[in-house]
Amino acid sequence: MATVRIENLGVTLEGEPGWNLLECSLLREVDHPHDCGGNCACSTCKVVVVAGGGNLSPQAEDERDTLDAYGWDPGAYRLACQCVIQGEGEIVIRLPE
């Protein structure tokens, strides 16, 4: 089990390995924007990974392309629908305002 802390919401969640960050938020009833339903098509679920990025799947080309298409720096943002929890440590994220 991983711990996912959304620092600007003051919320700490537990997430199972294999879940993506969007699933973790929604299953724990956290209001997380996701206009395309978590299909890597819109960038509304973007997050900033503050710490614990090593406990997440690496960024794939389609995620980078979607972020870039919407004007977000793929080096600074991740799509929560594409960040799969792969470890049991703490992950700290921030939702952009």
Image (cartoon, helix red, strand yellow):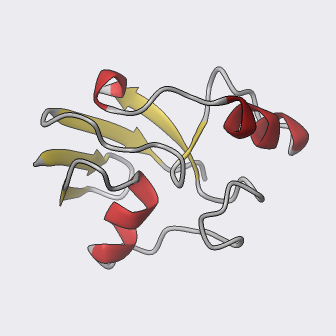
Q: Is residue 71 left or right of residue 30?
A: right
Counting labels gives: 0
The residue shown at (10%, 49%) is: 1
Q: Is residue 74 left or right of residue 31?
A: right
Splitting the image into 4 quarters, where does residue 51 fall?
top left
Q: Residue 17 in the image: x percent, y percent?
A: 22, 48
Q: Residue 92 in the image: x percent, y percent?
A: 30, 37
Between residue 92 and residue 9, name the one nearer to us: 92
Q: Residue 46 in the image: x percent, y percent?
A: 60, 48
Splitting the image into 4 quarters, where does residue 75 fall?
top right
The residue shown at (16%, 46%) is: 3
Q: Residue 34 in the image: x percent, y percent?
A: 62, 69
Instruction: Indicate whether 79 appears above or below 91.
Output: below
Splitting the image into 4 quarters, where does residue 9 fall?
bottom left
The residue shown at (13%, 37%) is: 88
The residue shown at (26%, 73%) is: 28
